């Protein structure tokens, strides 16, 4: 999955984001599906990122019977 990184100044200018860190999880069509602002005090960071990625991978899939 592609990753884009912006400085605080760039993020404020381009995305109107003023709280860092801010993470956007974007689906294949370019729609922001999840936004995480700041750090989360609970959970394992790697597991959390994997969860978001798995959700995005499953977005738009239909079940086959």
Image: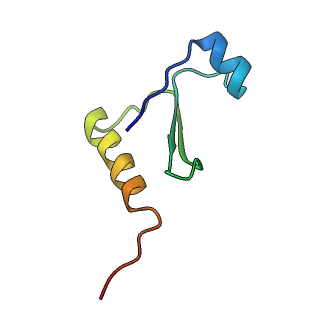
Tell me the quarter of the image containing the C terminus. bottom left
Residue 11, placed above or below residue 59: above
- Give residue 20's position: percent from left, percent from top: 56, 20
- Give residue 60's position: percent from left, percent from top: 47, 66
State the residue at coordinates (49%, 26%): 4
- Give residue 21's position: percent from left, percent from top: 51, 22
- Give residue 56's position: percent from left, percent from top: 42, 53
Q: Nearer the viewer, residue 40 or 59?
A: 59
Numbered disc total: 0
The single residue placed furthest to the bottom in the displayed view is: 65
Tell me the quarter of the image containing the N terminus. top left
State the residue at coordinates (58%, 47%): 30
Examine the image and state in which quarter residue 39 appears.
top left
Left or right, residue 34 beside residue 49: right
State the residue at coordinates (33%, 42%): 48
State the residue at coordinates (36%, 47%): 53
The figure's colour scheme reads rainbow
Left or right, residue 47 beside residue 52: left
Left or right, residue 2 beside residue 44: right
């Amino acid at each position: 999955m592609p990753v884009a990184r912006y400085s605080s100044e760039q993020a404020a200018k381009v995305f109107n984001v003023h709280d860092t860190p801010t993470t956007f999880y974007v689906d294949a069509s370019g729609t922001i599906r999840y936004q995480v602002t700041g750090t989360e005090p609970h959970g394992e960071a790697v597991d959390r990122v994997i969860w978001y990625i798995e959700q995005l991978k499953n977005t738009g899939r239909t079940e086959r019977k």
